Image: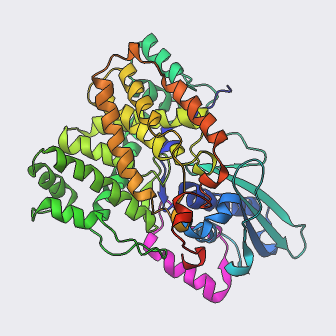
Amino acid sequence: MPYEPVSVFDIFKIAVGPSSSHTLGPWRAALSFVNILNQRGLSADLTGIKVLLFGSLAKTGIGHGTDIAVQLGLSGYDPVRMDTGTIPGLIQQINQDKKLKLSDGPVIPFDPARDIEFRIKESLPRHPNALRFMARFRQAAPVEETYYSVGGGFIETEEPAPVAGKSSQLPFPIDSANDLLHWCMKTGLTIHEVVMENERSWRDELLIKSELLEIWRVMKECMYTGCHVSGVLPGGLKVNRRAADLNKKLLEGRPDQSYEEWIKSIRDGGRDFKYILDWVSCFALAVNEVNASFGRVVTAPTNGAAGVIPAVLQYFISFCGGDEEKIISFLLTAGEIGSIFKKGATLSAAMGGCQAEIGVSSAMAAAAITEALGGTQRQALMAAEIAMEHHLGLTCDPIGGLVQIPCIERNTMGAIKAITASQLALQSKPDFAKVSLDNVIRTMWNTALDMNSKYKETSDGGLAVMIPISLSEC
């Protein structure tokens, strides 16, 4: 297996919902394409751009907002910093004017209904999530670029360029769980300590910690927001938000005017099993309701699975205790497990079904909380294996192509399975385990290869066809 350096910050990316592969990936692809035109000095001569969506991007692109993401990317908006509340107005203006102001470039004619084509019956062989940009000019020859959104917001072109800013060799090169365990055993370092040493090859340690706490700030802000916004989710399914009602019910009138006050009120409610279980579900629901509303979330490792890590980490903070150092350690460990899955299998539901999203996020959370609770390196890896083992074969079948049903509830299941997997591992002796994390990653990948395409984020099978919703309604 070729060595592939992947940073924790490649796994955890601040993004806009609802999908990392269908929203963030195409958004970043559009930004990249405009950058190519600008670098070549072609923007001033531009007369038009056409966007072709293939495979899964075409089949569920409307529900996932792929067309919206492409327009925002071409316009130069940054998914990390833009005010998400302005998105509906911006898209409405483009549709009304039939014009688009290119990032650092001219205003060009652009009719989304004409210039974004959903090639539902066409797929490109390299990956199910493919899109092509075609630019026309007054004098220059046309320019085309094909991108693949390979999961978790990662994009690739036909000829992938070297990853900028990445060293070719880290102090502890890791491509598998066995590699990670080898370095832990050889050095005596914990998982998060090994990961920190690798991250220091790219960033100063203080910056690493600062950026990880910023990741957590976005996660907890997303959770808190989702627990305080009621109403109906956009898209046509008329799905009611549930986190706010559950939050209100669980608090029983205790104050929650700020995040800090909210956490205190949660702790003051007790430690009953059912109470804690309800809060884990509430945390996960909140994140993914924000995600489904084009809100700001963190890929963990994807948007569709964005609720699992925050829910488990918030559970740890609220009911087990934890300071900033524990939060940093948690995210380092979780990120490394996610990178191992990316290298050994996939983070794309269009390639591997929902096992590649909820299953991976559950494994990430399981390993991280196991280490945070004092588990050994072997117990942490065992927890990750247990969590994924019980997500194997999980299909991706979003109703109406929306990241709502069954996606939102699946985040609650992934979070609870992660906690259960951790408890099992903490009470077990990993030396007697029959299945390793690397075994289960290979199994997951083989399962993905065998899985029928209608269960891979196409909305052609499973629940998606049991509930007759037209994409035009969404």
Rendered image quadrant of residue 110: bottom right
Horizontal arrangement in the rendering, residue 330 relative to residue 50 (left or right): left
Query: Magenta stretch: residue 427 in it?
Result: no
Residue 265 in view: yes
What is the x, y in percent for residue 169?
61, 25
Is 281 drawn above or below residue 137 in the view shown? above
The percent position of residue 340, horizontal first and vertical second, equals 54, 32
Q: Nearer the viewer, residue 122 or 331?
A: 122
**Magenta-span inclusion, residue 92:** yes
Residue at the farthest bottom position: 96
Give whichever of 403, 39 is nearer the camera: 403
* Number of numbered discs: 0
Q: Residue at x 31, y 20 (%)?
A: 428
Task: Tell me what residue is drawn at x 73 percent, y 68 percent.
Answer: 51
Q: Is residue 462 above or below residue 417?
A: below
Q: Position of residue 209 (x, y in %)?
A: 37, 39
Residue 231 located left or right of residue 202: left
Query: Where the C terminus falls, by quadrant?
Result: bottom right
x, y (%) of residue 235?
Answer: 49, 74
Q: Residue furthest top?
A: 186
Q: Is residue 437 left or right of residue 228?
A: right
The residue that appears at 44% across and 37% down in the rendered structure is 390
Residue toward you, 345 or 335 = 345
Does residue 329 appear in this view?
no
Quadrant location of residue 383? Answer: top left
Quadrant in which the N terminus is drawn: top right
How is the model colour-coded? rainbow
- Chain part drawn in magenta: 74-103
